[in-house]
Image (tube, grey):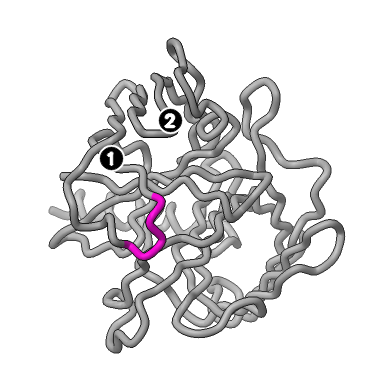
Amino acid sequence: MKTILIAVAASLIASVANAGPLPVGSWGGASSLISGPDVMALIVRQDPANPTAGYAILAEYTRLPYIPGPERLEIARWVQRLYVYRVEQLGKDRFAMKPLRVSAAGEIEADSAAVSGELTLAKTGTLVGATMTRYEKGAIAETITFDGKVSSTWENWVPGDYFGSKDSTGGDYTHKRINTRLGKDLSGDFFQLDIVGKFTASEKAPGMFVFLPSGAITKGADKIQGRIAVFVDIVNWKPFFTTDELLLINPDDAKDVGFYYERH
C-alpha cells in the first residue's frame, strides 16, 4: 500500500510539473457579435509535445431558449460557426491563436495568410475573465469574454454510425436515420444526397483528422476534402448518456459547418 501511495503521489507531482501555462478544458463566454441564449465555446487541449502550446476549437452554439438551470441542461441545438487554432504562448498570460488549414499536401498547418488572434488571461491557470480577439482581413472581427466552463469535451476518433444534418433547428437529433459510417480503421463511408463516396482519415494533429478519397467519389468531395474533422461531445451527459458529434470545419468559411450526429 505504501508503494502504491508513493507512486500515486509521484504521478500527481509529475503531472503538475508538466502542466503548461495554457488552461485546458472547455470554456464558455459572450461575443461582441451575438446576443440571447447563444454562447461561444472554446475547447482547448494541450500539445503533448510542447507544454507551452496547444490546440483550440472555437464554436458558436445556438441554444434552445428559455431553458433555466445548470449549464449542462442548456441544450445546444446547432453550431453556427467553427474555427480551429494552434495556440502558442506569447507572454506569461498571452497566447497567439493561429488559424489552421489543410495544405495542398493534406497536412494541417497554420494559415500563413491569416492574422493570428490573441487570447489574454485575466488570471493564470483559468480562462474565466479571459478575452479573445479574432481577426478577419487584418481587422478586429470579434471580441469574446469567457465567464465560465461549458460541459463539451474534445474526443478522439469515434467510430460508429452517424447522420449528417442540415437542420439548424436540431430537429434531426431524435430520429434514427443513418447516412454515414465511420470505421475503427479510420474509414469513412458517406451515402448522403449530396455526398457519396468512401474516404480514409488521417490524424494530422491531436484530435484533428483529414479525409482523403479511398475510392471513386460520386459527388460532394469538396464537402469532405480540405476540411478539418473533429469529434466533440457538445452537451456531454457522461456517464449517464452521451452522443458525440462529428464536426467538419471549413477553414475558408466558418459558417459552412459539417454537422454529424452519432447514432447508437
Closer to the chain start, of discs 2 and 1, is 1
Question: Which element type, helix, strand or loop, lies under badge 2?
Answer: loop
Q: Is residue 168 magenta?
A: yes
Q: Is residue 51 above or below residue 61?
A: above
Q: Pointer 2: what residue?
A: 195
Q: Where is residue 53 in the image (x, y as percent from the top left)?
A: 63, 50
- Who's the residue at 41% across and 49% down the image? 259
Residues under labels 2 and 1: Cα distance? 13 Å
- Who's the residue at 28% across and 40% down the image? 162
Q: Position of residue 124 (x, y in %)?
A: 60, 74
Q: Pointer 1: what residue?
A: 162
Q: How many numbered dots are placed on residues in this image?
A: 2
Viewer-proximal residue, 8 or 232? 232
Please give the range of residues in magenta: 166-170
Viewer-proximal residue, 215 or 156? 215
Viewer-proximal residue, 2 or 67? 67
Residue 51 lies left or right of residue 15; in this view the side is: right
Are the residues tagged 2 and 1 within 8 Å (C-beta)? no
Which residue type does callout 2 highlight? Ile
Q: Quadrant of residue 63?
A: bottom left
Which residue type does callout 1 highlight? Tyr
